[in-house]
């Protein structure tokens, strides 16, 4: 029995890595998925990888674009779909220590990882008035801990966990759940080069991690499927660490 056959999902960052893994899992579990990404080629690659019983449609768009919520509404209406899940997964990573981070860099991280996510979340709760829905954000273990000099990124991901708690508090009474996944080190385009070249990173994230491996996009997708499904109907405000136990200490 497909676990997401009653879900119509808008998924950002669907053209690569974790978002691609989510798209595959969501469609496999029967959902209608509108994948949004900057990269048309990435979306085409995801479209070629997914397989039913759900459906996968695409929209090229930038989460920093103020017009994106309306573009999503127009596309959904053309498809005859009514969204009831938003997965805010698009994000940029990396960066340096606070002393080396200028305003422009800080604002770039905040624009993509926070403002873009906030704007789409606002559109979702306003569209869902009187109807149940789920927002799932992709946070990070950097929402909770400091690790490797990614000051702007950590700032943005702490905000994501904070907004997850806040919106869960405000909108639970309307039947809207707001949850997040906090991936540890997952091998994607964002991290592959660093995993390959930085021995210290392998040492910290793999040798010192209880499960002794980096994660795969499907590890995050499996957590996301559970959190957005009705199996998690009593869970809200939670940011679930999926990190192989790395942050256990
Ligand atoms: P990725 O680079 O493989 O994929 C990110 C996707 O988002 C790309 O397809 C990219 O085109 C898209 N994107 C980037 N900026 C966008 C924008 N402004 N508008 C629309 N689309 C945009 O990265 P990933 O590792 O799959 O990361 C996905 C999410 O997971 C991010 O939020 C990231 O911070 C988070 N995360 C990743 C890891 C990891 O180890 N890979 C760990 C913790 C959190």
Image: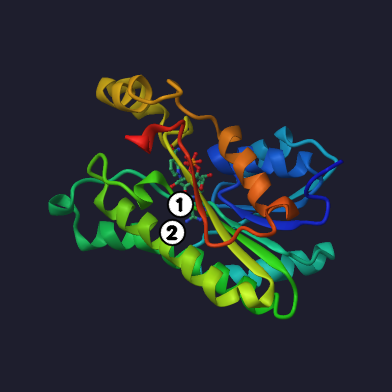
- Distance Cα–Cα, label 2 vs label 1: 6 Å
Give yes or no for contact between labels 2 and 1 (Cβ–Cβ under 8 Å): yes
Name the residue: 33% across, 23% down: 208
Per the image, label 1 sits on a secondary structure element best described as: loop
When the figure is inspected, residue 245 is found, relative to residue 223, above or below; the finding is above
Q: Where in the figure is residue 191, as x and y percent of width and height?
A: 40, 33
How are the colours assigned in the image? rainbow
Give the secondary structure at mark 2.
helix
Q: Residue at x 70, y 75 (%)?
A: 128
Is residue 111 rendered to the left or right of residue 12?
left
Residue 138 seen by the camera:
yes
**Residue at disc 1, CB closer than 8 Å to ligand 1:** yes
Measured as percent of width and height from the top left, residue 96 is found at 22, 45
Query: What x and y, as percent, mark residue 172?
Result: 62, 72
Residue 161's disc number: 2
Name the residue beneath numbered marker 1: 139
Residue 179, given in percent of the width and then of the height, sits at: 56, 58
**Mark 1, other Cα within 10 Å: few <14 / some 14–19 / many ≥20:** many
Look at the picture and state if 145 lies above or below 185. below
Asked whether residue 67 appears in the rendered view, the answer is no
Label 2 neighbour load within 10 Å: few <14, some 14-19, many 20+: many
Which label is found at residue 123? none
Q: In the rendered view, does 100 fall on the left or right side of 40? A: left
Whether 179 is drawn above or below 199: the answer is: below
Q: Residue at x 41, y 24 (%)?
A: 210
């Amino acid at each position: 029995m497909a676990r997401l056959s009653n879900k119509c999902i808008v998924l950002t960052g669907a053209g690569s890595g974790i978002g691609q893994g989510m798209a595959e899992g969501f469609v496999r579990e029967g959902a209608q998925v509108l994948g949004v990404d900057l990269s048309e080629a990435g979306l085409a690659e995801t479209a070629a990888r997914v397989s039913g019983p759900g459906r996968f449609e695409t929209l090229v768009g930038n989460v920093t674009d103020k017009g994106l919520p309306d573009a999503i509404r127009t596309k959904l209406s053309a498809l005859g779909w009514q969204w009831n899940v938003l997965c805010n997964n698009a994000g940029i990573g990396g960066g340096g220590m606070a002393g080396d981070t200028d305003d422009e860099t800080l604002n770039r991280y905040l624009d993509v990882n926070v403002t873009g996510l906030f704007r789409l979340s606002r559109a979702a709760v306003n569209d869902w008035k009187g109807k149940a829905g789920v927002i799932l954000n992709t946070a990070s273990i950097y929402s909770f801990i400091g690790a490797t000099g990614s000051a702007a990124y950590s700032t943005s991901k702490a905000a994501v966990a904070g907004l997850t708690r806040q919106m869960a508090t405000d909108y639970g009474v309307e039947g809207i759940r707001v949850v997040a996944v906090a991936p540890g080190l997952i091998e994607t385009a964002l991290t592959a080069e660093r995993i390959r070249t930085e021995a210290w990173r392998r040492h910290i994230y793999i040798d010192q991690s209880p499960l002794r491996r980096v994660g795969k996009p499907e590890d995050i997708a499996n957590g996301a499927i559970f959190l957005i499904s009705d199996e998690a109907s009593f869970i809200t405000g939670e940011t679930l660490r999926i990190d192989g136990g790395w942050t256990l200490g």
